[in-house]
Amino acid sequence: MKLTLPPLSLYIHIPWCVQKCPYCDFNSHAQKGIIPETEYIQHLLLDLEQDLVRYRQAIGDRKIHSIFIGGGTPSLFSAQGISHLLAEIRKRIDFEPNIEITLEANPGTAEAERFIGYAQGGVNRISMGIQSFEPEKLLKLGRIHDSQEAKQAVRFAQNSASFGLRSFNVDLMHGLPNQSVDQALNDLRQAIALAPPHLSWYQLTIEPNTMFYYRQPTLPDDDELWDIFEQGHQLLSQAGYVQYETSAYAKQGFQCQHNLNYWRFGDYLAIGCGAHGKISYTTGEIYRFSKTKHPKGYMRGEYLYQQEQIALADRPFEFFMNRFRLLEPTPKAEFETYTGLNMAEVATTMQWALDKNYLVETAETWQITQQGKLFLNELLEGFLT
């Protein structure tokens, strides 16, 4: 069994933030004292070097397609530190000519003032976690910026274009505690008015092991959530945004290339505390791996935490769980070349999904329908049996 190797991206996790938000289930740690920036960057590079040796045969001659620096709050690191990190990574593995490099940033004034420095250091896309413009909602979410700082951060991003910043994203949440339909849509209108090339608009969900899980707030009911989504989707469409993924909208040509590679079942190296990666071999093996979550263990040099092969029986679910987040057609050929399986393996499930109007197909593609989006969990469960 031979696999065609997909594009190869790189995820970098920086785990520190000023304070832990009550809804956040990411691997993040509230800042206590001075962040060990220089030391952590050294460990990131050592972690990468180990992966480049461990996965040498899988990587082959692939270059890095995209980089995403997430967290935590990566913008707590200095522009000089990020610039040094990217320069050192480039010495160890080649980048594709038009590589997209994204850095997640807190829209507070101090971090936003570094945007030009990040752009000069190689970052060409900023993702800002604004979440809401309403003071009461920001307080409830544990955010440390206000709406004016958020808008000022967007202006910093726009002014950084001449220094190499090609795009920026605004993260906005809806379905917030005690949020009315009008409040949610007002947030969205303010975000649209800032004209970001990319807008991630997603519903708050209560995740285990978060403050909201243990002290559950009152959230909008299902009817209100549907009204928010339906009317919000209309606002975004009228403003020229195209929904290309479950929670992502972009102006033409500004889709996040890193996330597209995730959802297209691409490969990605992963370095940093708790980072998750995926790597494929031409010989047919596909592995998922993760790194040590806690900074103390990670900075003792204990980088790799877990690695396991994706079994053949699990590959249909793994492939479509990613692919059907995207609204674009799924090439049938990619199912075979990226999983090593024959289409006959999923023929029965596909026919069931077509009969339920969860999918439509052509000779070359499958594509999820509006019905399929509404019943996505049921659709994906079909690939588990």
Image (spheres, grey):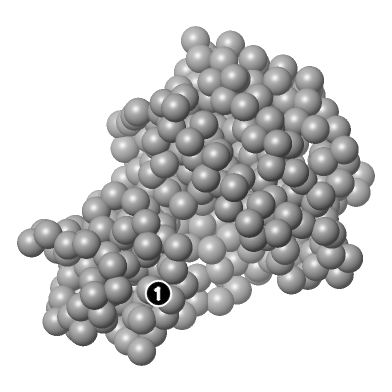
Give the left or right position of residue 135, taking residue 28 as reference: right
Question: Residue extending furthest bottom?
Answer: 385
Residue 217 x, y percent position in the rendering: 84, 59
Q: Which residue appears at 74% of the width and 71% of the height?
A: 208
Quarter of the image where the C terminus is located: bottom left
Give the left or right position of residue 307, taking residue 43 as reference: left
Quarter of the image where the N terminus is located: bottom left
Name the amino acid type tagged 1.
Leu
Residue 367 x, y percent position in the rendering: 26, 58
State the image quarter where residue 382 is shown. Answer: bottom left
Say which residue label 1 marks.
380
Give the left or right position of residue 195, taking residue 258 as reference: right
Residue 112 x, y percent position in the rendering: 71, 23
Give the left or right position of residue 149, taking residue 46 as reference: right
Tag 1: Cα neighbours inside 10 Å, few (<14), some, or many (≥20)?
many
Residue 51 seen in render: no
Q: Which residue appears at 51% of the width and 57% of the height?
A: 270
Residue 100 x, y percent position in the rendering: 42, 35
State the image quarter where residue 150 is shown. Answer: top right
User: Tag 1, which secondary structure?
Assistant: helix
Question: Residue extending furthest right?
Answer: 33
Could you say which is closer to the camera, residue 241 or residue 141? 241
State whether residue 254 is above or below residue 340: above
Q: Which residue appears at 60% of the width and 73% of the height?
A: 305
Residue 224 seen in render: yes
Could you say which is closer to the camera, residue 248 or residue 378? 378
Question: How many callouts does the rendering have?
Answer: 1
State the image quarter where residue 293 is shown. Answer: bottom right
